[in-house]
Amino acid sequence: MKIFKYLFCAILFTSLSASAQDEEKVERQQGHTNQNKFKQLYDEFATPNMFRTGSGAPGPAYYQQQADYKMDIEIDDVNAKLYGDETITYTNNSPDDLRYLWVQLDQNMRARDSKTPLIGNSGIAPATSSSRVVKSYLKESFDGGFHIEHVKTVNGKDLPHTINRTMMRVELPKVLKSGESFSFKIKWWYNINDHVKDGGRSGYEYFEENDNRIYVMAQFYPRMAVYNDVEGWQNSQFWGRDEFALPFGDFDVNITVPADHIVDGTGHLVNREEVFTKDMMKRFNKAKKSYDEPVMIVTQEEAEKTEKTKSKNKKTWKLSAQMVRDFGFATSRKFLWDMMAVKIGDKDVMAVSLYSKEGNPLWEQWSTKAVASTLKSYSRLTFDYPYHKAISVHAPMGMEYPMICYNFGRPDKDGNYSDRTKYGMISVIIHEVGHNFFPMIVNSDERQWTWMDEGLNTFSQYVAEQDFGEWYPKALSPNDKAYPSRRGPAKNIVRYMGGNQDYIAPIMTKGLNTYQFGNNAYSKPATALNILRETIMGRELFDYSFREYANRWMFKHPTPEDFFRTMEDASAVDLDWFWRGWFYTTDYTDIGIKEVKKFAVTSTPNDNGKRLAERYNRDPKSLVYFIEEGDEGYDNAIKNKEDLNNLPTVKEYIMDNFTPEEQKEIKKAPKYFYQVTFNKPGGLVMPIIVEFTYADGTKMRETYPAQVWRLNDKEANKAIASEKEIVSITVDPDLETADVDTSNNSWPMEVKDSDFDTFKNKVKN
Ligand SMILES: [Zn+2]
């Protein structure tokens, strides 16, 4: 018994002390944590320094590393293997001494010992397809990792290296000092994956007819990691979700493929005369002067003939690229090829498409035009596209690399396609070609910040889609007056932002760790920027600042703060509250009208008025009284047609204080007085956009800046004086703030009941 008693006491004691601790914690929070939504972002932002300034620009000590590659690549089409040999020259432009280098081995995500499958959930369903059962339980997993044959110095000496999953640390023979370069060689091979069956951002698609493949290749070589002032080495593992962080460099790549293949990829084709037929050369020269319609370099008839046989010979295509962060290429004997020129500034850029007959007729109609249109739109939003070409390749995925991207959109076997397929294809092309700007040129860290490329790009995609619809109205379906963009309009994000908070993460979350990846990293930031442009900043200030950001960080590595700071720095619009709400929290917009009170003006006080005059010790005759509808004195005031111009005290005040000249300037008195109480059930602070409708049917708009919420996050009152009677009020009439609940957006609640008095009476009865 004693023991029990003792135990009881102990439990009581701990529970007491725990609750005392809780109380203390609550007190401490209330006392010291500033939750103000307009609080400056100093706690979240890195301190500006010589590398990155407080204005959001690269600082005087800004540096970036350079990685140059010389590669020999061979595709073994019979066995679907890639063989590679590369010399990387790494230049240390940082002020730091480096003892080792980190190299990315992305294909190891597909290695047999990959941990990627282990972080997903798996379960057992009551019924499963036999293909899935075989794949899950009976088949040896695909050996898709890199087989590194050697890592050597240029003199052939082995370099010690350690592979930690998708990252490889290479030991330098001696410290690489600031300003020094180091060259080394890697030889490797790997089994190319079937990206249709196994997924992925590169690999091949297999076509049973004639036993052919289309290869869209990327992450096929050991690639240098980024080293910079904010991360040191960015060697965060590749789990398959978050994309890439890569330094800029120059590439010389020789790609050996079967002689009947067509190849295109990042960079200039330096041996065009060797790999092109005379006909292809002639057509290519014609394409360089064709600005309206693409010219076929390889026709469908030719491609269909080629894919029926297989050459035993090999051909090497030589590509050379300067200032690119990565390299991709596509190869197949199935390819049709078309090109046209597009004027960007005073330069001609080639818009290019590679597709198989399965993509037609859709691809020959719209792919290359979508590429050209995208380059024009994005160049207007940012800077003139600096590369000499942009290629769109038909493959059932959407993925981007410098100058080349892979895009879905395939008609039925009989060549018919739905609007959904058509718009899907045009949108993905605009999106992936757009990635040339973000992140291929404005080179943000995708491994860390998915929104910095996907969000900025999806926002720009929205603008480019609208341009495309305007420039190519024939591409639109008869019922569509404008291009039906999916992501960007504020109302389209409402379902996501108003959804279950347990499955929403702030935008400032690493992609791997977010729920609803597409909504989080694409739609929400794109919508936020669209709202910033249309509603908060206005197009002129937004576009100037957005262009400034793009130009400051063109061919450099920006961070989120560099973007946030530049948008403020170039516009003088205080946006800390906006970044905080939209990017650092999962709050949503919900602003409503809580109450509207109507007043009459009079010089005769009722009891309330008398009490106030007494309390402030004022002569009751010197005051002007506002009496709320329904209160004592209201009806009299209305009946007597009192208004501000004829109230004796007001008249007297004007006579005493204004010159005759100034008196002429006095405004005609408003006749109707209202006090509108807006409330904000939503966490986001946003401007209150209000539309007032008058009894004569005319309308007036007013926007109260978001700062209206700075001292009271719950409610805002506004006194409205009007010459005309107001019969209805609507908040966010154009649905531009992503308000998740519009049922509280209008007064009177029933919009059709537009008569003020009948509404008021109904409420009172
Ligand atoms: Zn994207």
Image (spheres, rainbow, N blue to C red):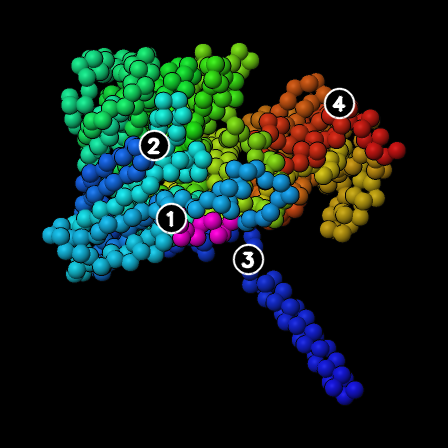
Disc 1 target residue: 111
Q: Is residue 113 magenta?
A: yes
Q: Position of residue 471 (x, y in %)?
A: 41, 15
Disc 3 target residue: 34
For marks 3 and 4 on the same chain, the one whose residue lies earlier in the sequence? 3
Q: Secondary structure at mark 2?
A: strand
Q: Position of residue 97 (x, y in %)?
A: 21, 59
The magenta stretch is 110-120
Disc 2 target residue: 216
The kind of residue tagged 4 is: Lys
Mark 3: few, some, or many residues within 10 Å (few <14, many ≥20)? few
For marks 2 and 4 on the same chain, the one whose residue lies earlier in the sequence? 2
The answer to whether residue 459 shows anywhere in this view is: yes
The kind of residue tagged 2 is: Val
For marks 2 and 3 on the same chain, the one whose residue lies earlier in the sequence? 3
Disc 4 target residue: 752
